[in-house]
Image (cartoon, rainbow, N blue to C red):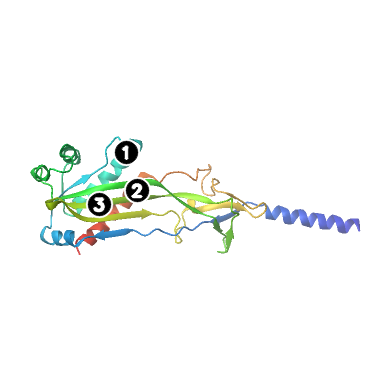
Amino acid sequence: MKIQIKLICIALLVIMSSCSTLLKGYIRLDPQKDELLATQQIKDFMKINNNPSIVLRVPSSEAQSKQADLNDYVYNGIEKELTLAGFKVKDRELSNEAMDKSSGKDQQNKKLIGIDLILEVVRIENNKKYSTNTVYRKNGKEKILHDYYSIAKFGALVELKIVIVKNNEYGGSFSFNYTPCPPENTNCNCIVAFKDVPDRVYPTISFCNKKSYTVFDNVDKSTVEELARNGVKKMMEEIRK
């Protein structure tokens, strides 16, 4: 009888030990769709103006001081893409200074500096939060975490607006999203550690790197630049239809 009790205890210990083992899972986040809105006015304008002049209108440096390095990196990427698309890109700093002095009302001042179009950067985010309470096991089965557990990742957003300087016409708005860990992604940062007993997730433990990482790392600037440049390409397709 004592032997049977010992065997039962050993079996329970083995089960508990296996349940508390750190397991490897992965997360999937539903990608957020881009929004592309081009007016008929900008499409008509582009049909008769193959290589218009354009300036990138950016938020004031004071309002964006916290992420100035990221912004400048992305601005330069957008201007490069506009140049590759055949636009005559005007000096951003001089043109923005002139427009600031005119308070956006003096159209003649804008014409004097030779601007056909203004591409305004409405917003750049590299800390857009996505979260889920679902982890997928190696076999693809779902594990739903308790209500007080969730895994968060940061994505990115670039939002642009285009204006036709002549008559100050609205040309369209375009927003582009980078979603971390889409279903087809096998990125290491989308792999998470979890346990069945106790039911717990360890989002800062990495199976790929020697050191643990923080789940709240912002999206790096090269990824945001790529998002913006690909976004400009998509915008070109819309306004040149």
Closer to the chain start, of discs 2 and 3, is 3
Q: Amino acid at mark 1?
A: Gln
Which residue is located at x 13 percent, y 62 percent? 47
**Picture quarter containing residue 107?**
top left
Which residue is located at x 58 percent, y 54 percent? 24
Image quarter (top left, top right, bottom left or bottom right) of the N terminus = bottom right
Q: Is residue 115 left or right of residue 3?
A: left
In front of the other: 1 or 126: 126
Q: Mark 3: few, some, or many residues within 10 Å (few <14, many ≥20)?
A: many
So how many labels did they put on this image? 3
Q: CA distance from mark 2 to mark 1?
A: 16 Å
Q: Whole-percent x and y of residue 150? A: 54, 51
Q: Mark 1: few, some, or many residues within 10 Å (few <14, many ≥20)?
A: some
- Residue indicated by mark 2: 224
Q: Amino acid at mark 3?
A: Lys
- Residue indicated by mark 1: 64
Asked if disc 2 and disc 3 are in contact, CB closer than 8 Å, the reply is: no
Q: Is residue 27 left or right of residue 76?
A: right
The kind of secondary structure element at disc 2 is helix
The kind of secondary structure element at disc 1 is loop
Q: Amino acid at mark 2?
A: Val
- Residue indicated by mark 3: 161
Closer to the chain start, of discs 3 and 1, is 1
Q: CA distance from mark 2 to mark 3?
A: 17 Å
Closer to the chain start, of discs 2 and 1, is 1
